[in-house]
Amino acid sequence: MPRIQPDDSVQLPAFATAGSSTMTSLFQTMAHRPDIMQSSMQLVEAAMRGGTVEPQLKELLAIRVSQVNSCFY
């Protein structure tokens, strides 16, 4: 199955580029469908930045979940 190449011309918010290059590529690839990209960025922003749990702990949990599932993060 062919892979969709990232759209490097898209300006992403800081939170979308602050993590791993995998996350940056994910959002750049979704940029081919801006409506999907915007909704996904809002969901990630709300999940990782909102609430009462510290963002650093959420990040550690995301890393651990990726390890348990044998995924790159």
Image: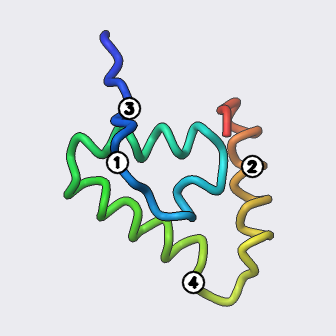
Amino acid type at image mark 2: Ile
- How many neighbours does mark 4 have within 10 angstroms: few (below 14), some (14-19), or many (20 or more)? few
Q: CA distance from mark 1 to mark 3?
A: 9 Å
Q: Earlier in the sequence, mark 4 or mark 1?
A: 1
Q: CA distance from mark 4 to mark 1?
A: 25 Å
Q: Nearer the viewer, residue 55 or 34?
A: 34
Q: CA distance from mark 4 to mark 2?
A: 18 Å
Name the mark nearer the viewer: 2 or 1: 1
- How many neighbours does mark 3 have within 10 angstroms: few (below 14), some (14-19), or many (20 or more)? some
Image: 34 above or below 26:
below
Q: For mark 2, what is the residue?
A: 63
Amino acid type at image mark 4: Gly
Q: CA distance from mark 2 to mark 1?
A: 26 Å
In this rendering, position of residue 15 left or right of residue 42 = right
Image: 15 above or below 64:
below
What x and y, as percent, mark residue 62?
69, 55
Amino acid type at image mark 1: Val
- How many neighbours does mark 2 have within 10 angstroms: few (below 14), some (14-19), or many (20 or more)? some
Name the mark nearer the viewer: 3 or 2: 3
Residue appearing at x 39%, y 54% in the figure: 11
Q: CA distance from mark 3 to mark 2?
A: 23 Å
Image: 47 above or below 50:
above
Residue appearing at x 52%, y 44% in the figure: 24
User: Quadrant location of residue 51?
Assistant: bottom right
Q: For mark 4, what is the residue?
A: 50
Q: Secondary structure at mark 3?
A: loop
Q: Quadrant of the N terminus?
A: top left
Q: For mark 1, what is the residue?
A: 10
Q: Quadrant of the C terminus?
A: top right
User: Quadrant location of residue 9?
Assistant: top left
